[in-house]
Amino acid sequence: MEHEEAYSLMMMDLDEGLDTRQADQLDRHLILCMACAREWQALQSIHQLFLHTPALSPVAGFTQRTLARLPEGRQRVWFLGLVYLSLLLSGVLPVIGLGWLALRFGPALFEPAIWGGLAQAAGQLGQLLVTLLSALWLGLEGLATYASQHPLLWVYLLLLTAVVVLWGGIYRQLVLVNAPIRS
């Protein structure tokens, strides 16, 4: 017997009962198949639990009170209408605004003077960046020359770094010691 047939017999036994031939087939299969036997035990336990559980009935007037608390159909329609209108406007208004801006300022974008002014401004900005980078490069070259001529500068910088690291460690230790303990 296949597992599906055994499962079908289990369900039939729980629902309406089996005749003796079917009950014998199920018993033989349950002896041979431990997985189906465990499944049968679980199904019987659940079935017994359902049989012994008392039926619950709602409190008197439950339906009337619940229906009375629901909003009226007209109020619900107005509320949903306002929600849909706000969603529509939140999506449509930006599109309308962009269209208005395109109509208002679109022709100005096709003026050659605007593009020429933008190109000139970009060129001047590029010259400014080149000047700043070259000044920075010259400053770094000067610093490198100065540092190579004065080796004590490196010792001084190393000493300052050591002091900062030392005081940072001391500060962390003081903070950890004086920190309140949270539980």
Image: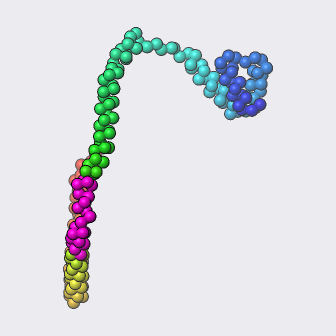
Residue 87: x %, y % from top left: 32, 39
Residue closest to the far top = 60
Quadrant of the frame with the N terminus? top right
- Which region of the structure is painted magenta? 101-123
Q: Decide which of 172, 123 is in the foreground and name it.
A: 123
Residue 71 position (above or below residue 97): above
Give the image location of residue 3, x and y in percent.
Answer: 71, 32
Location of residue 75 by image quarter: top left
Question: What secondary structure predominates along the stretch shown in magenta?
Answer: helix
Residue 97 visible in rendering: yes
Q: Is residue 176 above or below residue 165?
A: above
Residue 10 among those drawn in magenta: no
Residue 117: in magenta span: yes
Q: Which of the 4 image quadrants contains residue 79?
A: top left
Q: Residue 155, located in which quarter of the rendered image? A: bottom left
Query: Which residue is more in the foreground, 66 or 115?
Result: 115
- Residue 131 in the image, given as x and y percentages of width and height: 21, 80
| Residue 151 seen by the camera | no
The image position of residue 164, as x and y in percent, is: 22, 69
Above or below: residue 89 compared with residue 76: below
Task: Identify the residue shown where x is 21% and y is 90%.
Answer: 149
Frontmost residue, 128 versus 102 = 102
Residue located 75% across and 17% down the image: 19
